[in-house]
Amino acid sequence: MLSWYLIGTDNARQLMVPYSRAVSLVPAGRIDAPSFSTLQDVINWFESERLNLLAALHQAMELGQFDIAWKLPVVADAFFEMRSYWKEWRQIHVDGVSAARMIGDDLGEAANLICLGDAMWRLGEHEDALTTYEQSSRIAHEIGDRRTEGYALRGSGLICYEIADYDRALQLFENALEVFRASSVKRGEAMSLLSLGTTFKMLGRMDDAVRHCEEAVEILRDIDDVWSVAWALMPLAEALGSAGRFSESEGQLAEAVEIFRRFDDRNSEAMAWEHLGDVLASQRKSDAAIAAWSKSFEILESLGNSRSREVGQKIEGLQG
């Protein structure tokens, strides 16, 4: 049963986020694991099986099936993030780290630590996230896992960016980019370029910001990583808006909204609507901005996301 869930979840991962972390699975044997033909099939299966996945992970830990217990969180990672089950997302990787340590599996520990760092970052646990990213980077470097090392370096950069240490953030993003390019990890290369672009925007270097973000989007389109394209369009749109290229910015955000809808990624869709509202407000298109922010507010409220208060304040500001 545990193998059925592990293999089925990995089949779903390959369709939904094909450039996410792959791990060596347990032998399939005669297991007739779930397979999927459409994105909606994946979303429906995950929602119907989510609690069972959590129960399966708990049982794997209890039974000492630690190989499965560290791999299941890794292959399920994107689903918990996209569907905004952030506390569960954090917990599965706490368990995954514990399982990997029980059997001394350095790859499993590093892979779960990078995901745990992401969950902590999303939850605003910046200090713990930075420590976790640094642990992941150290282990990954020691075992030659360049992919995980690159993402851990970028994760550390994101924390430095959040605390306004932009010089350190730029250095970490450059280091991550070097690692990804040396190991031909195209998605990681694109995500590092995006992070560099966002930092350049904050420093007022708009031409550099737009150039790095455009290069990132081009890479993601080339590898057909659709969800990541939508994610990349948001910082590109922000850079274009800051450079005064408003119509281009609006177009990028409209495309991002549509992609996130296809993936039923409600949190990211809300972010795209909020950014679109910001761009419209900067052009004094008050009615259109309020309409975009209102869509963001409704989604965030439905998810119980506290950011809805900030979006609501933006609406009140224009209406007042």
Image (cartoon, grey):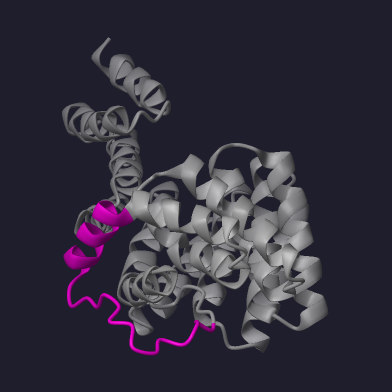
The x, y position of residue 12, in whole percent, is 32, 71
Verify whether residue 240 appears in magenta.
Answer: no
State the residue at coordinates (30%, 78%).
33
Q: Residue furthest front?
A: 63
State the residue at coordinates (68%, 64%).
152
Q: Residue furthest top?
A: 320
Whether residue 200 appears in this view of the structure is no
The part of the chain drawn in magenta is: 24-49
Query: Image quarter for residue 286?
Result: top left
Verify whether residue 28 appears in magenta.
Answer: yes
Viewed as shown, does residue 316 lie left or right of 154? Answer: left
The x, y position of residue 131, in whole percent, is 77, 50
The x, y position of residue 66, in whole percent, is 62, 67
State the residue at coordinates (18%, 63%).
40
Viewed as shown, does residue 239 lie left or right of 139? Answer: left
**Picture layout, residue 134 above or below residue 104:** above
> 194 or 126, which is in the foreground?
126
The x, y position of residue 241, in whole percent, is 38, 49
**Picture layout, residue 221 above or below residue 39:** below
* Quadrant location of the N terminus in the rendered image: bottom left
> 233 or 119, which is in the foreground?
119
Query: Image quarter for residue 32?
Result: bottom left
How many marks overall?
A: 0
